[in-house]
Image (cartoon, rainbow, N blue to C red):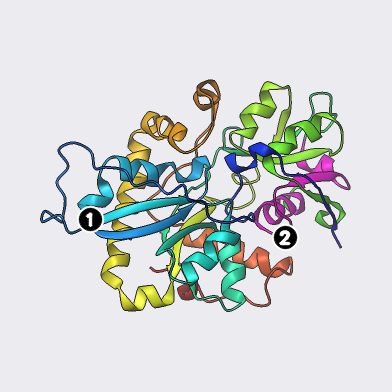
Amino acid sequence: MMRNLRAAAVGAAALLALTACGSGSPTDGGTTSAPAAGSESAAANGELTPIEVGVIPIVDVAPIYLGVQEGIFEEHGLDVTLTLAQGGAAIVPAVQSGQMEFGFSNVTSLIIGRDAGLPLKIVATGPQTTGEAEDDFAHVMVAEDSDVTSLADLEGQRIAVNTLNNINDSVISEGMKQEGGDPESIEYVEMAFPDMVAQLEAGNVDAIGAVEPFVTLAEAGGAQRVYGQYAEPVPDLSIAAYFTTDEMIEQDPELVDAFTAAMKESQQFATDNPEMAKAVLPSYTSLEQDVIDELTMPRFPQEHDVASLERIAELSLETGLIDEIPPTEDLIVQ
């Protein structure tokens, strides 16, 4: 059995980059952006449909902010309010109750939720690994003076992840298995991303499963990259997605189609305009410009990689996170 140790404090900066599987509650920080000048709205008569989308203040959601800013959602007849939450634990019930029409979460959380009977389904994809082990937005990192040079060297060691029993420990364990090590020997320590660099430097953990901007911040302090946990164990890993309820899909398919189309365009716009995707980050995070300039952004595809979704579901079953793999058609609108 993997040994789990729960770390204590969440720093004041935790809101900056908690993942889609963290805990927390929605804030009142919803933002509706005006359309870009000269955009041609699909609702020329001004009758836009208001929707609320629960998101998290991390680089992964840059495309939706960019899409709102550039008027893409208005062109599809949508007046979007983006409401910041600390994590999916707050967003999921808000979407289930109808308080929000759509939400953002990592795929493991959605798979676990579906297995538990929650009527949630992916309608648009979010961030995807770059596929480059040396240049991705997530890395397992060790201290500057560490002798560790590969993931297998961390066998029996303590690795910090932001949430236990979720996507990060799942893919790190799979990577350890592929590298010939014993994933059961890893001691995972639950720790908020903003706390990881200091705890690594203090020697309280042997490695951290970091994501941007904390990869860049850790590297600036001398930490070394040893493994790309999103890029290496699962090809073309789609990490997170936008979801809604089965009821919404059945009762208002036109609204769902409009949101999906707008998200696809926004993802493509972010891909085609990477500097604009970075430039939107200060509008909803506290990142400094020098960090933004250095960090690696995810890929932003238009379509979710279904094979990677199915592989994450298999890993979730193998690690005991779910009792059985939900049918793919229950996980994603295709």
Residue 320 position by quadrant? bottom right
Identify the magenta region. 150-177
The dot on residue 165 is 2
Q: Secondary structure at mark 1?
A: loop
- Residue 140 visible, this angle: no
Q: Is residue 20 magenta?
A: no
Q: Mark 1 or 2 closer to N-term?
A: 1
Give the residue displayed 48% in from the left and 75% down from the top: 330
Q: Which sits in the foreground, 326 or 266?
A: 266
Give the residue displayed 23% in from the left and 51% down from the top: 74
Residue 307 locus on image (x, y percent) = 51, 61
Amino acid type for the residue under numbered disc 1: His
Please, is residue 195 above or below residue 171 in the view?
above
Please identify the quadrant where the C terminus is shown. bottom left
Residue 222 locus on image (x, y percent) = 73, 22
Residue of label 1: 76
Q: Is residue 155 magenta?
A: yes
Alpha-carbon span between mark 1 and mark 2:
38 Å
Instruction: Answer with left or right where residue 213 lies relative to residue 188.
Output: left
